[in-house]
Amino acid sequence: MNFKQAIETGFRKYFVFSERACRSEFWFWTLFVWVAGILLSVVDGALFSSVAVEGSGPLSGLFSLAVLIPNISIGVRRLHDIDKSGWWLLLLLIPLIGLIILIIWFVRRGTEGPNRFGPDPLAHIEAAPQA
């Protein structure tokens, strides 16, 4: 999955918590959210300098709210890809240790073939003949 496809999938599956997400989908989405957040913070600083200094400006704040649900859903789908329940995302409530555990899980290769959360998201790519 490329960068553009990952962003489209992230918004298309806004409320989908029941499927699987491959590593590239998750990490490209994460890159998009970080870069867009930084760019919007810069724009906030330029347009709303008094507000942006105190914290999140209006544009970056609205963007953060807009991608909150997709961030959760793609995290859940990524955990499903390694055959773990989405409830493990609650590890984020444990400072630092929870984040480290989740990052380790997010970089792991997904379960090959179908698992209890659905078919392998990479199955159609691997089945395609190599040129």
Image (tube, rainbow, N blue to C red):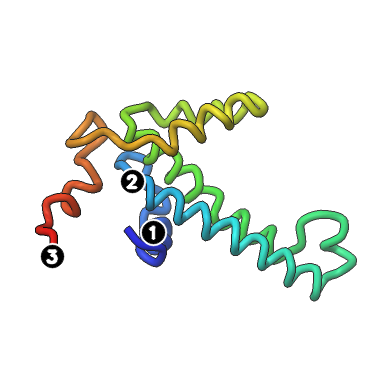
Task: Say above or below: 93 vs 126.
Answer: above
Residue with the mark numbered 2: 22
What label does residue 131 carry, if any?
A: 3
Name the residue located 38 percent from the left edge and 51 percent from the top edge. Answer: 24
Residue 50 is left or right of residue 110, and the answer is: right
Q: Amino acid at mark 1?
A: Ala
Disc 2 and disc 1 in contact, CB within 8 angstroms? no
Say which element carries label 1. helix
For marks 2 and 1 on the same chain, the one whose residue lies earlier in the sequence: 1
Residue 59 is left or right of residue 14, and the answer is: right
The Cα atoms of the two marked residues, 1 and 3, are separated by 23 Å
For marks 3 and 2 on the same chain, the one whose residue lies earlier in the sequence: 2
Where does residue 67 sit, x and y in percent of width and height?
Answer: 54, 54
Name the residue located 25 percent from the left edge and 46 percent from the top edge. Answer: 121
The Cα atoms of the two marked residues, 3 and 2, are separated by 23 Å
Name the residue located 13 percent from the left edge and 65 percent from the top edge. Answer: 131
Disc 3 and disc 2 in contact, CB within 8 angstroms? no
Pointer 1 local density, CA inside 10 Å: few below 14, some 14–19, many at least 20? many
What label does residue 6 carry, if any?
A: 1
For marks 1 and 3 on the same chain, the one whose residue lies earlier in the sequence: 1
Where does residue 64 sit, x and y in percent of width and height?
Answer: 62, 55
Where does residue 94 sit, x and y in percent of width and height?
Answer: 63, 24
